[in-house]
Image (cartoon, rainbow, N blue to C red):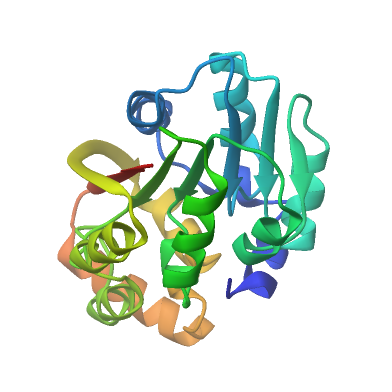
């Protein structure tokens, strides 16, 4: 997984930076429970789980006895290791697979664009999962509707694999694939959004210089005159079942 150093620099601020509403987090959380069908007998693996807050919440709500937060950024993983009820492992998806640990459900939440060599990974996950085991990819379409400037939109599109390719890869590995899509709309102040952009809250922004970020913010400011931005986030929920 790429951009480890980028996330190291955000580790202590990440939970505060991600200013999306609690309703947004509930929206995503409910889809995870629905698509993965989490229950107390499951062992969950959250690949790229960051600071572990989502992993911990899912584990608590489903009554899981075992949940792994797998995170390649050492500083992010250190934050996750402080949380009760989950086990933080500092590695990437391939590194976790090499541990040959037992699990029944696997989550890739907004991290799939960091995985360059996926086909072999899907084959290994398919072999390790039990019958009716599931993996869930949460991602976005290549055309994002965030209030980005144009070059940021272009960067996002170039990093994001099309969902049709992901479906083809998973089916080739043997999975039965189902795709759901939904959108959540919420408001955020320009001030908070611009702060998130300056800290490069998404890895797609990591290659932009401070000057380019500032120019992008000026572009956004001209496009949106109100003090609050209406943000619509389209998400794709790709469920693969063995």
Q: Is residue 148 above or below residue 13?
A: below
Q: Is residue 4 above or below residue 155?
A: above
Which one is in front, 85 or 222?
Answer: 85
Q: Quadrant of residue 64?
A: top right
Q: How many marks?
A: 0
Question: Which quarter of the figure is the C terminus placed in?
Answer: top left
Would residue 31 be found to the left or right of residue 40 on screen?
left
Q: Quadrant for the N terminus, please.
A: bottom right
User: Along the horizontal axis of the image, is 130 left or right of 145?
Assistant: right
Q: Residue at x 32, y 71 (%)?
A: 160
Is residue 228 something one can see in this rendering? no
Residue 136 in the image: x percent, y percent? 39, 44
| x then y, percent, for residue 181 | 18, 42
Relative image position of residue 199 (x, y in whole percent): 56, 64
Determine if residue 92 is in view.
yes
Give the camera-side residue of 80 and 65.
65
Viewer-closest of 197 and 177: 177
- Residue 135's image quarter? top left
On screen, 161 above or below 33?
below
Which residue shows up at 61% across the image and 37% down it? Answer: 103
Query: Which is nearer the eye, 173 or 117?
Result: 173
**Residue 114 image offset from top left, x and y in percent:** 49, 70
Left or right, 89 with respect to 29, comes to right
Q: Residue at x 47, y 83 (%)?
A: 208
């Amino acid at each position: 997984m790429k951009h480890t150093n980028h996330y190291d620099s955000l580790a202590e601020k990440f939970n505060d930076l991600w200013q999306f509403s609690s309703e947004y987090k509930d929206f995503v959380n409910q889809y995870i429970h629905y698509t993965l069908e989490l229950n107390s007998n499951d062992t969950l693996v959250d690949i790229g789980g960051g600071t572990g807050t989502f992993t911990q919440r899912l584990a608590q709500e489903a009554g899981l006895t075992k949940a792994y937060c797998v995170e390649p950024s050492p500083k992010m993983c250190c934050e996750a290791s402080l949380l009760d009820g989950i086990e933080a492992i500092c590695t990437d998806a391939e590194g976790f697979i090499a541990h040959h640990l037992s699990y029944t459900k696997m989550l890739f939440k907004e991290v799939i664009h960091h995985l360059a060599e996926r086909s072999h990974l899907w084959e290994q996950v398919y072999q390790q999962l039990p019958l009716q085991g599931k993996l869930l990819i949460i991602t976005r379409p290549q055309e994002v509707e965030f209030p980005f400037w144009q070059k940021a939109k272009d960067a996002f599109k170039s990093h994001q694999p099309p969902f049709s390719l992901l479906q083809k890869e998973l089916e080739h590995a043997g999975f039965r694939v189902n795709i759901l899509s939904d959108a959540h709309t919420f408001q955020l102040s320009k001030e908070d959004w611009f702060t998130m952009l300056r800290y490069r809250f998404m890895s797609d922004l990591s290659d932009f210089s401070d000057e380019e970020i500032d120019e992008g913010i000026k572009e956004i400011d001209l496009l949106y005159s109100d003090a609050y931005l209406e943000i619509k986030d389209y998400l794709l929920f790709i469920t693969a079942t063995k």
